[in-house]
Amino acid sequence: MKRAEISNLYDLNQTIAAEIFEGLMYPWEALAKISDFIRKIGPTLDPERYEQRGEEIWVAKSAKVAPTAFLNGPLIIDEDAEIRHCAFIRGSAIVGKGSVVGNSTELKNVILFNSVQVPHYNYVGDSILGYRSHMGAGSITSNVKSDKTLVVVKDDEEKIETGLKKFGAMLGDFVEVGCGSVLNPGTVVGSHTNIYPLSSVRGVVPAGSIYKKRGEIVEKQG
């Protein structure tokens, strides 16, 4: 399933967590490794640039964190990131350089690459968001199937059994998700793709496309 491979989704130069992807083919294989990775590299971060703010919580000194935000470890907030009013970071999260986590946004077991924006009422769980990806207001990742069975990634006739009960979405670099959209468990969106507002998305969406609705995906022009 080439379209879902790490090399086709992400520029690994745009995350502090590049090492976590070494030896892996698909990005969801990294989900189980996030917490241990943070615990490993947190203590090695330059104390001139990062400070430890609590148990297993490392925050860059250049980051802006609202006093009303809730931070739970293990957690790394990288340089120049902004954590806004009432953001809720439950732990096992890496927030990339220059990223924005906004009002009432909730993160859990995620990697946000650099310059990611989840600025308004988003839920992002068990997911990886690529460089400069953006989730519009109210868009969320749904990370558990309603029947509680294990998540399967589907790309037309191809299927991959992930063995994961919790798996939200893998967004490639420069993905734009429209307001109010739901990314169903096992969603993979290729880089430079736009998702229409109020969409319900599942399966693998090709890179460089516009997702209008299920069965109506067109290639970007120009």
Image: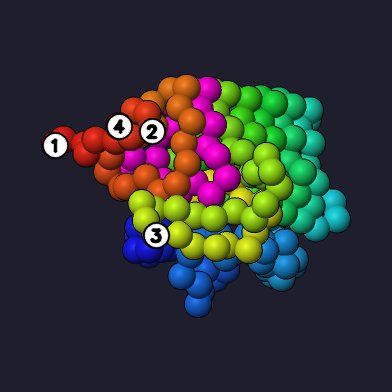
**Which is more N-terminal, label 3 or label 2?**
3
Give the magenta part as a residue range.
Answer: 175-193
Any magenta on residue 181? yes
* The disc label shown at residue 216, or none: 4
Asked if the residues shown at circle 2 and circle 1 are in contact, with their CB atoms under 8 angstroms apart, the answer is no
Q: CA distance from mark 1 to mark 4?
A: 19 Å
Q: Circle 2 sits in a helix, a strand or a loop, which is it?
A: loop
- The location of residue 49, given as percent across then percent down, is 64, 55
Disc 4 and disc 3: Cα gap in Å? 19 Å
Q: Is residue 56 magenta?
A: no
Disc ID at residue 222: 1
Q: CA distance from mark 2 to mark 4?
A: 5 Å
Q: CA distance from mark 1 to mark 3?
A: 29 Å
Q: Amino acid type of disc 2?
A: Arg
Badge 4, how many Cα within 10 Å: few under 14, some, many 20+?
few
Q: Residues within 10 Å of mark 2 (few under 14, many from 20)?
A: few
Residue at image x 66%, y 31%?
105
Q: Marks 2 and 1: which is nearer the front?
A: 2
Q: Which residue is mark 2?
A: 214
Residue 169 coordinates in the image, percent (x, y): 53, 46
Q: Quadrant of the image for the N terminus?
A: bottom left
**Amino acid of disc 4:** Glu
Residue 158: which numbered mark, if any? 3
